[in-house]
């Protein structure tokens, strides 16, 4: 066996292994596990997880160096856990970096651009109901179509017409415009 790969051995004449390095190794492993648990609870950028992985690995090395029985098996388990946690950490951080700058898919921001169906007439001044994103929302027209003249009355979008969400008004009111589709001609009616 190569001398640098051999575990430290202690002869009868040598001093017994020190208890302090074994305790330090055990404490490093326990603190590493505690830091990983804190990383799961706290919102952060993964630095505690990386610190926990390093602490667990260092604790395993200290235990091997101190000559603790079966520390090689323990070190193997710690290396496996550290590799899995490190891979998970860098995988999550890498995927979160890929999401930066993408359009939101949830909340109010995720509804902008969604197409819905009018359930009750919607006007520029009068609220109606639209079905968007699997929910019923109060809605108003965001602006009057260019073809509407003041003498024609309030522009309205009739029941069954398609609308596109372009913003949000006060409260939970969505602002919509008639959807632009090839078969959608004359979706805006004049109330008069």
Image (spheres, rainbow, N blue to C red):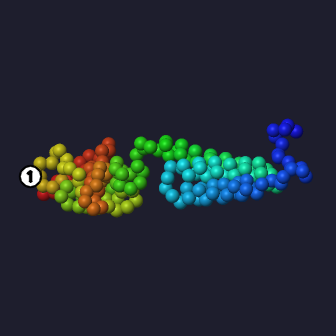
Q: Identify the residue at the far top of this view.
A: 2
Left or right of residue 70, residue 127 in this image = left
Q: Nearer the viewer, residue 18 or 30?
A: 18
Could you tell me how many numbered marks the image carries? 1
Q: Where is residue 169 in the image (x, y as percent from the top left)?
A: 25, 57
Left or right of residue 4, residue 26 in this image = left
Where does the N terminus fall, quadrant-wise? top right
Q: Relative to 96, say whether 37 is above or below.
A: below
Q: Position of residue 140 (x, y in %)?
A: 24, 57
Q: Identify the residue at the far left of this view.
A: 151
Left or right of residue 136, residue 187 in this image = left
Residue 77 in view (yes/no)? no
Q: Residue at x 72, y 58 (%)?
A: 23
Q: Where is residue 30 in the image (x, y as percent from the top left)?
A: 66, 58
Where does the C terminus fall, quadrant-wise? bottom left
Say which residue label 1 marks.
Answer: 151
């Amino acid at each position: 066996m190569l001398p640098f790969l051999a575990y430290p051995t202690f002869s009868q004449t040598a001093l017994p292994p020190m208890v302090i390095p074994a305790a330090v190794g055990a404490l490093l492993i326990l603190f590493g596990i505690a830091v990983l648990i804190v990383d799961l609870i706290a919102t952060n950028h993964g630095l505690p997880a990386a610190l926990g992985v390093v602490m667990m690995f260092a604790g395993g090395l200290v235990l091997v160096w101190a000559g603790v029985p079966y520390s090689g098996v323990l070190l193997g388990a710690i290396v496996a856990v550290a590799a899995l946690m490190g891979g998970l950490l860098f995988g999550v951080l890498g995927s979160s970096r890929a999401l930066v700058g993408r359009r939101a898919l949830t909340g109010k921001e995720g509804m902008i651009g969604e197409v819905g169906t009018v359930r009750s007439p919607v006007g520029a001044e009068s609220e109606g109901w639209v079905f968007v994103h699997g929910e019923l929302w109060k809605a108003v027209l965001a602006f009057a179509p260019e073809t509407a003249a003041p003498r024609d009355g309030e522009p309205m979008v009739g029941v069954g017409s398609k609308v596109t969400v372009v913003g949000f008004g006060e409260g939970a009111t969505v602002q919509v415009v008639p959807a632009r589709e090839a078969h959608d001609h004359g979706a805006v009616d004049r109330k008069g």
